């Protein structure tokens, strides 16, 4: 009888150990969240720098600060059991891929844990659209990342900046500043983008797409 009880308790103890609840004694999963833009006071707050603006809003809401490191300004935060590395590249838009590749290698982050926030003139101001992969669509920042990573299989969040410009005026428009009306709604739209970033990290790209695209 004693032998049977001892055997039972050994089996019970093993099963209890095997069934440790998810999240306990597990290493946090790392995500690289990249906001695209250009460094320099002349670009701060422009439409083309909306990626920087969104990450600044996320950092402020999370009470974290960016520090200057190699290839960009970097901040780290915890989101439940996930570790987020926020990156604002200092390479200028056309060379964004250099910063993304460096930090992915440094932090050992897989492609499916990368999310890039970028401006998009094809969307109304403040509207977001998340995709799990895709071509650069003529955006030099995305083009650089695709080329340097050798893949298009990574998620991107396009944040609409509108397209109210005359023929030939695209460059001046994206390097210009949002209108007063757009600035008035920017905090609320940035909050939606931040919620979508968190959804991507906690529940995956499909969940983020289904719940935040065109919201």
Image: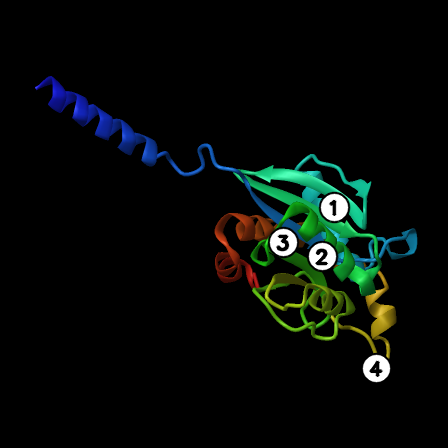
In this rendering, which labeled residue sits more in front, label 4 or label 2? 2
Residue assigned mark 3: 193
Q: Disc 3 versus disc 2: distance between alpha carbons?
A: 23 Å
Residue assigned mark 4: 167
Mark 2 vs mark 1: which is more N-terminal?
1
Residue assigned mark 1: 56
Q: Secondary structure at mark 1?
A: helix
Where residue 8 appears, x then y in whole percent? 17, 26
Q: Disc 4 versus disc 3: distance between alpha carbons?
A: 30 Å
Q: Disc 2 versus disc 1: distance between alpha carbons?
A: 21 Å
Q: Is residue 164 left or right of residue 76?
A: right
Within-10-Å neighbours for mark 4: few <14, some 14–19, many 20+: few
In this rendering, which labeled residue sits more in front, label 3 or label 2? 2
Residue assigned mark 2: 101
Q: Is residue 129 left or right of residue 19?
A: right
Residue placed at 22% from the left, 30% from the top?
Answer: 11
Q: Quadrant of residue 110?
A: bottom right
């Amino acid at each position: 009888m004693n032998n049977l009880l001892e055997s039972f308790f050994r089996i019970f103890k093993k099963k209890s150990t095997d069934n440790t609840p998810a999240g306990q004694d597990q290493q946090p999963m790392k995500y690289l969240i990249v906001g695209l833009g250009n460094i320099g006071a002349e670009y701060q707050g422009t439409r083309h720098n909306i990626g920087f603006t969104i990450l600044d809003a996320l950092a402020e809401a999370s009470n974290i600060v960016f520090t200057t490191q190699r290839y960009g300004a970097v901040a780290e935060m915890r989101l439940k059991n996930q570790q987020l590395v926020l990156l604002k590249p200092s390479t200028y838009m056309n060379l964004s891929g250099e910063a993304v590749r460096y930090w992915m290698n440094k932090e050992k982050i897989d492609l499916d844990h990368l999310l890039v926030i970028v401006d998009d003139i094809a969307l109304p101001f403040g509207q977001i659209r998340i995709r799990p992969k895709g071509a650069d669509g003529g955006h030099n920042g995305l083009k650089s990342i695709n080329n340097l990573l050798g893949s298009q299989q990574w998620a991107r969040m396009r944040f609409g900046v509108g397209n109210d410009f005359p023929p030939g005026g695209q460059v001046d428009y994206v390097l210009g500043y949002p209108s007063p009306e757009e600035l008035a709604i920017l905090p609320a739209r940035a909050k939606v983008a931040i919620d979508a970033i968190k959804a991507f990290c906690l529940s995956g790209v499909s969940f983020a797409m289904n719940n935040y695209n065109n919201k």
